[in-house]
Amino acid sequence: MAKILTVKPSCTNHYYLATAAILSPPKAALSLSKSMAACSSFCPQRPLQYRRKPISCLPIKPQFSVQVKAFSSQESSAPPKDEIPARIGFLGLGIMGSPMAQNLIKAGCDVTVWNRTKSKCDPLISLGAKYKSSPEEVAASCDVTFAMLADPESAVDVACGKHGAAGGMSPGKGYVDVSTVDGETSKLISAHIKSTGALFLEAPVSGSKKPAEDGQLIFLTAGDKSLYETAAPLLDIMGKSRFYLGDVGNGAAMKLVVNMIMGSMMASFSEGLLLSEKVGLDPKVLVEVISQGAISAPMYSMKGPSMVQSLYPTAFPLKHQQKATPIAAAANELYKVAKAHGLSDNDFSAVIEALKVKLQERS
């Protein structure tokens, strides 16, 4: 049975063992015992028969080709220094970007930052980051530049606008957009970046503020495979896993599907909390019951207690979630109601307030 081993890399000593496949013979296991001791997390075992054949109930070609990067145990020794980008840029230091950039700095990486509001750069500068006054200057001074922007409009402006990152790109450089944008926006940014001779990778993340702080994000990447491989050690500093999905647009599509499912789950969970209260049950106990059962999800345990208290500390803004749920029409309408009641900048769990309004209207 195969196991997956992941060891977090460090830019300081350039030690890097990523997603090593171990086929579990005794000798191989013994030879990697020291590496396994340093491992931060293990992925669950997955039977081989589920890896090879895509499962589909429809007789059509699958839209996405999911590939997970795996290295053999022979590749576990430290790579040459030039395999890890020496200079890293980071554009956008909001709820997600700031902790992601901090993790790179703490790992010993040479990071240059930019943000529209300069004051948001100051904590990172105090940790050792450099600062440039425009995305163009950051891109010009770095080998690989990451961008984490709040919305598609900002992502396009920072990459393609006046003094945008594209102006500082050139052959040999790479641009990794970790923002959540639609496929067309991602393709537009890709075209601008690649016209300079540089490489482009979209890499939206699954995860919010806490996973970003803990370096536990999931990267859904697509684009230039060589840039994916170059950026892999950096992605592994900021996240717990990464997927390469092929052509630009597939990463954005996967992220939007994940968000749609998450939004529907939150809407159903909110309705359950209110129903439990309406029939005389303690919603706190409901959260505990759910956490013990088959429908348990970290999101419920993490957000449930604060929702019961009508508190919605922002990890993933509701206004961004509403954009991601057009497929789940009923859930989307609830998020629209919540936005109309001034909850756009609250966490998306504030959708429960929209349900409260609907219940009041019915009574």
Image (cartoon, rainbow, N blue to C red):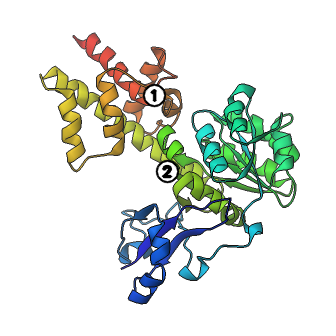
Task: Using the rendered image of the protein, determine whether residue 117 is visible from the camera's viewpoint.
Answer: no
The one of 225 and 331 positioned closer to us in this rendering: 225
Mark 1 or mark 2, which is nearer the start of the sequence?
2
What x and y, as percent, mark residue 105?
67, 47
Does dot 1 land on a helix, a strand or a loop? loop
Say above or below: 125 vs 283: below
The answer to whether 247 appears left or right of 272 in the picture is right
Quadrant for the N terminus, please: bottom left
Residue 216 - label: 2
Does dot 2 land on a helix, a strand or a loop? loop
Callout 1, which amino acid? Asp
Mark 2 in CB contact with mark 1 (< 8 angstroms): no
Tell me the CA gap for discs 2 and 1: 19 Å
The picture quadrant where one finds residue 200 is bottom right
Callout 2, which amino acid? Gln
The picture quadrant where one finds residue 182 is top right
What x and y, as percent, mark residue 220?
56, 54
Residue tagged 1: 347
The answer to whether 42 appears left or right of 145 in the picture is left
* Residue beneath the point at 43% across and 89% down: 27
Q: Give the mark toward the camera: 2 or 1.
A: 2
What x and y, as percent, mark residue 167?
87, 44
* Residue beneath the point at 53% across and 67% down: 68
